[in-house]
Image (cartoon, rainbow, N blue to C red):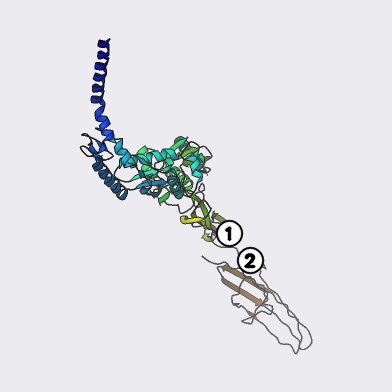
């Protein structure tokens, strides 16, 4: 019995000695921290604390934390806008970090970011609190705390678009547009290339039509490339995309929409625009025999954008008259019907969530000259003659008997009257021949006259009486003139 008791005492003593030798170091480190130093290859955040006491390690970590807060920046990003986050909002727990640090490994600082401070900054950059229902703020909080706990050097940006949940479809951007292909000659080319075609524009990237065709080895005619570029230009209208190169035609094509036309000429005229946002945007293009349609989809934009028409003018064509010797008289041929010209001025307005316009920029200011109407007229028109020209020989005898001072005169007049009327130049030639035999009673004036006369030119046609010598006819008649303005 005594031997059994002795055996139990020996076993108990052996266990106590063995257990104390195994756990003593750890217990001493916990209860006597002032006497502890960290083992080799022990890191806390970016600082090595090997062979440092807890007091030394705490001082070193506090200095490193202050340097990180002062020198580096954390940004929140939303639709291209950056908001510096106040780093002093992070609450560091350095003593607790040291107490629970493991020797020989890399340890992170214990840090906490108050959720209220984070939500306050999110609302400040988005200008709305409605985003909270579509944003995984807890995941964003953990990712930001991780960066703060590691004291990583350099700036860090957290894009809120990367933390949107599946229920955030209401915040996405969607724009649609279409162009009629009636009158175009490249229908098959359009339908072959743009059949459920997708084009992704990465964040902070530019896009060039000519570079894209060359890189993708896509061969489009200038007209087809112009239609595609015009569709893209209309789609990016209500966005914050920036256009750096655009050209238009002298005469607006029939397929184009006023203010949205883009002219492409391979290796000469390009269309280039930039996506200033951090997220990607996708164009989806479809072409049929009648239309080419497009849709732009992507993340939310900083503001709501709207294209507004400031001014529009229709410029009526003038009429150009050309005279042609090949046209029959009194004929007219319309060589060009003519077409109205256009001036249009569009601006892009950015509105905040309350509907206030915060920015207005020029989007397009296009001028198309009118196509003048061209008419071809015959070179001359026939003269308008009131009395026909009569040429007839006249031989007559006149016998007069009467009282003094009275007489009867019978005359015959043979002559020709020619009127050449062109461009307000009238040549009138009258050849009058009078053969008169007059017999008068006493008191009468016997006269035998024969002669010819030249009447001065008049305008139009002439119907007049006889003329003897240079005496003007007793009945000069009536005249009319029709003139035509020369070229």
Q: Name the residue under label 1.
A: 329
Quadrant showing the N terminus:
top left
Labelled disc at residue 368: none
Occupied quadrant, residue 143: top left
Q: Tell me residue 100's x, y (percent).
A: 31, 35
Q: In this view, does 312 lie to the left or right of 478?
A: left
The local secondary structure at tag 1 comes to: loop
Occupied quadrant, residue 384: bottom right
Q: Which of 28 and 463 is in front in this view?
A: 28
Occupied quadrant, residue 283: top left
Residue 67 appears anywhere in the view: yes
Q: Which of 293 and 223 is in front in this view?
A: 293
Q: Tell me residue 400's x, y (percent).
A: 76, 82
**Which residue corresponds to the image point at 27% horizontal and 45% vertical from the top-left?**
64
The local secondary structure at tag 2 comes to: loop
Q: Tell me residue 226's x, y (percent).
A: 44, 46
Q: Distance between the residues labelled 1 and 2?
A: 13 Å
Labelled disc at residue 384: 2
Q: Tell me residue 203's x, y (percent).
A: 39, 43
Q: In this view, does 213 lie above or below 419?
A: above
Q: In this view, does 71 lie to the left or right of 414?
A: left
Q: In this view, does 423 lie above or below 259?
A: below
Instruction: Verify CB contact (< 8 Å) between mark 1 and mark 2.
Output: no
Q: Residue furthest top?
A: 1
Instruction: Return the disc, 1 or 2, that comes first in the chain's sequence.
Output: 1
Residue 294 appears anywhere in the view: no
Q: In this view, does 425 lie to the left or right of 414?
A: left
Q: Which of 317 and 214 is in front in this view?
A: 214
Q: Residues within 10 Å of mark 1 (few under 14, many from 20)?
A: some
Q: Residue furthest right?
A: 403
**Which residue corresponds to the image point at 22% horizontal and 37% vertical from the top-left?**
35
Q: In this view, does 435 lie to the left or right of 105?
A: right
């Amino acid at each position: 019995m005594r031997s059994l008791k002795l055996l139990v005492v020996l076993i108990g003593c052996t266990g106590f000695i063995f257990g104390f030798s195994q756990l003593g170091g750890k217990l001493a480190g916990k209860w006597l921290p002032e006497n502890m130093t960290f083992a080799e290859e022990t890191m806390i955040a970016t600082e090595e604390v090997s062979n440092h006491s807890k007091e030394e390690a705490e001082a070193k970590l506090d200095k490193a934390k202050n340097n990180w807060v002062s020198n580096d920046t954390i940004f929140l990003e939303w639709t291209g806008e950056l908001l510096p986050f106040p780093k002093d909002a992070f609450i560091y727990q350095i003593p607790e970090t040291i107490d629970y640090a493991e020797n020989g490994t890399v340890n992170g600082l214990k840090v906490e970011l108050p959720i209220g401070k984070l939500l306050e900054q999110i609302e400040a950059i988005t200008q709305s609190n409605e985003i909270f229902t579509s944003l995984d703020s807890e995941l964003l909080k953990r990712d930001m705390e991780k960066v703060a706990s590691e004291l990583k050097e350099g700036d860090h940006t957290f894009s809120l678009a990367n933390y949107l949940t599946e229920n955030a479809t209401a915040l996405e951007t969607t724009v649609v547009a279409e162009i009629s292909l009636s009158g175009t000659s490249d229908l098959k080319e359009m339908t072959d290339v743009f059949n459920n075609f997708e084009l992704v524009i990465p964040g902070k990237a530019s896009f060039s039509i000519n570079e894209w065709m060359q890189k993708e080895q896509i061969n489009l005619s200038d007209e087809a490339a112009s239609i595609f570029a015009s569709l893209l230009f209309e789609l990016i209208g209500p966005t914050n995309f920036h256009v750096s190169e655009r050209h238009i035609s002298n005469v607006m094509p029939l397929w184009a929409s006023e203010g949205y036309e883009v002219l492409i000429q391979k290796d000469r005229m390009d269309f280039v625009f930039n996506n200033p946002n951090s997220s990607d945007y996708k164009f989806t293009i479809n072409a049929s025999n009648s239309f080419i349609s497009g849709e732009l989809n992507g993340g939310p934009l900083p503001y709501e954008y709207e294209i507004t028409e400031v001014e529009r003018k229709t410029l009526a064509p003038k009429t150009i008259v050309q005279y042609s010797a090949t046209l029959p008289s009194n004929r007219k041929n319309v060589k060009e019907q003519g077409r109205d010209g256009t001036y249009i001025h569009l601006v892009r307005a950015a509105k905040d969530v309350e509907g206030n316009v915060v920015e207005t920029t020029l989007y397009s200011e296009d001028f198309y000259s009118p196509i003048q109407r061209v008419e071809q007229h015959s070179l001359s028109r026939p003269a308008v003659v009131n009395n026909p020209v009569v040429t007839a020989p006249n031989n007559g005898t006149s016998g007069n008997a009467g009282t003094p001072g009275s007489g009867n005169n019978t005359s015959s007049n043979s002559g020709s009257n020619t009127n050449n009327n062109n461009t307000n130049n009238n040549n009138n030639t009258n050849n009058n021949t009078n053969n008169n035999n007059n017999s008068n009673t006493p008191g009468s004036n016997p006269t035998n006259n024969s002669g010819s006369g030249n009447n001065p030119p008049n305008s139009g046609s002439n119907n007049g009486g006889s003329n003897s010598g240079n005496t003007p006819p007793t009945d000069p008649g009536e005249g009319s003139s029709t003139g035509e303005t020369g070229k």
